[in-house]
Image (cartoon, rainbow, N blue to C red):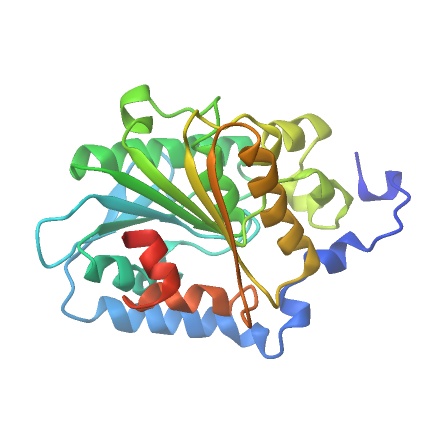
Amino acid sequence: MTKTEYSDMRDWDDAFNNMGHVKGSDALPGFWAARAADYRRGPVRIDSDISYGDSAREVFDLIWPDTPPRGVLVFVHGGFWMRLDKSYWTDLAEGARAHGWAVCIPSYTLTPVARISEITKQIATAIEAVGHRVDGPIRLVGHSAGGHLATRMICCDSLLPPKTSARIEKTISISGLHDLRPLLRTAMNATLKLTEAEAAAESAALRRPIAGAKVTAWVGGAERPEFLRQSQLLAMMWDGLDADTNLVVEKGHNHFTILDSMTSPNSALCSELAD
């Protein structure tokens, strides 16, 4: 379906337009890139561009703690599945790294080159690959579209091998997208190329979670109402399906500032990720 086939009472383009509602947000990608580059020039050990697939973007960086790792935390970036890559986010590893976790940050093939369902498969492959490099438990965290990809890993139809799924002890979706159907009503679907069937199949809120999955939906109180709904929906739906769910609305944060706490070992978000 195309956007013009709907008769909507809501402006769905505006509902998902975070940058249009945060002053100065046009400068953020450059700021993120510079901050991450500064971090990579520091003393932290980083293994860069580890291949996990055949395409150029199927690579991840692995940031190591100063001591033997407790396990690995995988951070999946956002950008509506159609922009950005791992190089913008390296510094976000610091909070979990300071708590003794290795941190994996993968890139993935963007739409429209890959469908969203294909990106889901790539993230599963990346997690399996890093699981062979780092022993111990696996924790997943994703932001925005990355929140979708992280929660898809703990759905009952997850593409992860059972032994790897069993190692996932916690998943945190930060401002995640868990109901993809409204995106059919947006102009960006010209790039995403979602169909009704794929949108439903890829919506974690419409899937059954793995029994006993532990998941937190973490969202900023100053975000667009649709992102609050998306987090509330996942927590509500999965709570009725035997998942251990938690919803945190962090006051004062928008879709972008919500990530800043990942750099601080003492933040509430970092405690949720790493403790």
In percent of width and height, residue 65 lies at 15, 56
Farthest residue, direction bottom = 24
Seen in the picture, residue 28 relative to 231 is either above or below; the reply is below
Between 52 and 65, which is closer to the camera in this rendering?
65
Residue at 59% from the left image edge and 79% from the top image edge: 24
In percent of width and height, residue 58 lies at 36, 40
In percent of width and height, residue 168 lies at 32, 35
Seen in the picture, residue 253 relative to 24 is either above or below; the reply is above
Residue at 67% from the left image edge and 35% from the top image edge: 194
Between 249 and 184, which is closer to the camera in this rendering?
249
Tell me, yes or no, if residue 112 can be seen here: no
* Quadrant of the rendered image containing residue 219: bottom right
* Quadrant of the rendered image containing residue 270: bottom left
In percent of width and height, residue 193 lies at 67, 37
Farthest residue, direction left = 67
Residue at 68% from the left image edge and 69% from the top image edge: 20
Between 248 and 255, which is closer to the camera in this rendering?
248
- 255 on left or right of 59: right
- 32 on left or right of 71: right
Tell me, yes or no, if residue 116 can be seen here: yes
Seen in the picture, residue 63 relative to 114 is either above or below; the reply is below
Between 236 and 222, which is closer to the camera in this rendering?
236
